[in-house]
Image (cartoon, coloured by chain):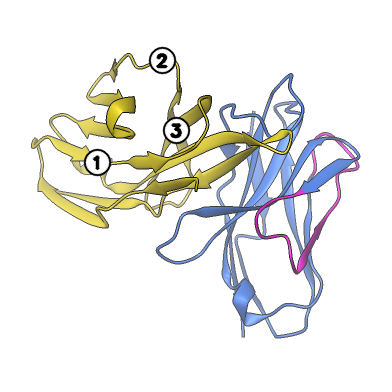
Amino acid sequence: NAGVTQTPKFRILKIGQSMTLQCTQDMNHNYMYWYRQDPGMGLKLIYYSVGAGITDKGEVPNGYNVSRSTTEDFPLRLELAAPSQTSVYFCASSYSWDRGPSPDTQYFGPGTRLTVL
Amino acid sequence: AQKVTQAQTEISVVEKEDVTLDCVYETRDTTYYLFWYKQPPSGELVFLIRRNSFDEQNEISGRYSWNFQKSTSSFNFTITASQVVDSAVYFCALSFAASGTYKYIFGTGTRLKVLA
């Protein structure tokens, strides 16, 4: 299994540009998450999904959108990039019988380092 | 307020020394979960342990051990006989139920440098 994969690894955007961060997992996990990690800080949850077709906001959803059309994929969309979105983005997945982002073991991807200039 | 505090920003030790990383949490809930993750220089996050609030038993896994004390709201992590490969940022996290779902709060991390 490849686990959780993310593309791209690095990206530089200009203010106002848009892009999609890709995340794929091959572990048949029902839960998927997007976090951002700012320098010297912990992770903050942006969005999560409990299954295909179901998504919900986390702690810092503004400026982002997500979709979950398949179990495997959970892309994160930035519509109008702003310097405040400069961060490292991590995708994670887990498996749970419960609704909501239950506190099960999360498996993380390698991260995408995004810079907005 | 729900909060995780990792007061140690950075710790440096010499190889083979023991080191303890502190984690103090705040929560109103009686049911909650605590985690430790490791982030090596390569950047990925690696799960180390999950503990629920009803299980105060300490745990040992090889050179790693965890001390969970509800009385002091702490979930400290000790590495015995540290090695250079232990150099990483370590995050403590708290998960609790809120509005029908579970929320996660991560600490700001402790950077551990193990010198040869």
In the picture of the structure, the residue carrying the numbered disc 1 is B21
- Shown in yellow, the chain is B
Identify the image quadrant of residue B16: top left
Looking at the image, can residue B116 be seen? no
The magenta stretch is A57-73
Q: Earlier in the sequence, mark 1 or mark 2?
A: 1
Classify 10 Å Cα crowding around label 1: few (below 14), some (14-19), many (20 and above). many
> Which numbered tag is attached to residue B35?
3
Question: Would you say A106 lies left or right of B63 here?
Answer: right
Looking at the image, can residue B27 be seen? yes
Locate residue B106, reporting x and y percent.
Answer: 48, 47
Q: Earlier in the sequence, mark 3 or mark 1?
A: 1
Residue at 63 percent of width and 34 percent of height: A2
Locate residue A42, reporting x and y percent.
Answer: 46, 54
Classify 10 Å Cα crowding around label 3: few (below 14), some (14-19), many (20 and above). many
* Image position of B48 with respect to A20: above or below: above
Circles 2 and 3 on the same chain:
yes
Q: Earlier in the sequence, mark 2 or mark 3?
A: 3
Please state the chain letter of the residue tagged with numbered disc 1 in the rendered image.
B
Q: Are marks 3 and 1 in contact (CB under 8 Å)?
A: no
In the picture of the structure, the residue carrying the numbered disc 2 is B55
Residue A71 magenta-highlighted: yes
Locate residue A4, reporting x and y percent.
Answer: 64, 39
Numbered disc 3: secondary structure:
strand
Disc 2 marks a residue whose amino acid type is Asp
Q: What is the CA distance from the residue labelled 3 to the residue labelled 1? A: 13 Å
Residue at 19 percent of width and 38 percent of height: B20
- Identify which residue, B115 or B103, lies in the foreground: B103
- Shown in blue, the chain is A
Disc 3 marks a residue whose amino acid type is Phe
Locate residue B46, reporting x and y percent.
Answer: 46, 37
